[in-house]
Image (cartoon, grey):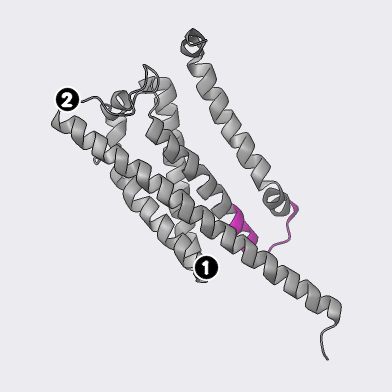
Amino acid sequence: MLPSKTETHTETKTRDTQIVRVSGLGVLFVAGGVIGLIAAVVLLVEKMALAANPDYIPSCNVNPVLSCGSVMATAQAEAFGIPNPIIGVAGFAIVAAIGTGLLAGGRYAAWFWISVQVGVTFAVVFVHWLIYQSLYVIDALCPYCMVVWAVTIPIFWYTTARNLRALGKKQTWITLLNEYRGAILTGWFLIIITLIANRFWDYWTTLL
């Protein structure tokens, strides 16, 4: 029995939607990977320069709050015994490569997406630990680090949404999560911005 025109149209529409979603994720991975990679490389270069010359003033030392040097000099900057930017260089290079594969039409196996999910989950947890350390322990913000935060969160969020969707379960919460994933991401960023504004409010008011 041949499929009806309605069934054929529905299948075509579903396939086109999937292609758009894959392309969108590919663009996010490439753009986020490249931006994160550049930020990580600059951070690594700045950290090496600071290690070679303690009197070196990093280019991202803007004011007492926005100060990479203050962050680089802490133990948190080498959380796993190596400079954090090295982890970023490796991680973002991989992300950009995956995105390039997606845009080229590549399709990855389920086990591969599980591995990606593990990686981006580690990254987003690590980033939020660094956010906490910057706000409430170090008392300074690293501009380049903030760029890394800004790309890591959406990469994690959209990867998670994609993987939940791939489960194929028509659960309401998964549908809602995917439908409002952009709004949720916006709210996520607004919370972080609010925390930053509140933590350093006394300093921000001096600039007015």
Q: Can you see residue 34? A: yes
Of callouts 1 and 2, which one flags the residue occurring earlier in the amino acid sequence?
A: 2
- Residue in front for this viewpoint, 138 or 205: 205
**Which residue is found at the position 42% from the left and 57% from the top?**
96
- Image x and y of residue 192, in percent: 54, 29
Which part of the image, by quadrant, shows the N terminus? bottom right
- Image x and y of residue 191, in percent: 59, 29
Q: Amino acid at mark 2?
A: Pro
**Which residue is found at the position 52% from the left and 48% from the top?**
156
Q: In whole angstroms, how far apart are the C-alphas of marks 1 and 2?
A: 48 Å
Residue 54: image tag:
2
- Residue in front for this viewpoint, 201 or 163: 201
Q: Secondary structure at mark 2?
A: loop
Q: Can you see residue 80? A: no
Residue where numbered disc 1 is placed: 110
> Which segment is the magenta one?
161-172
**Which residue is found at the position 47% from the left and 48% from the top?**
121
**Number of numbered tags placed on the structure image:** 2
Question: Image check: 78 left or right of 140?
Answer: left
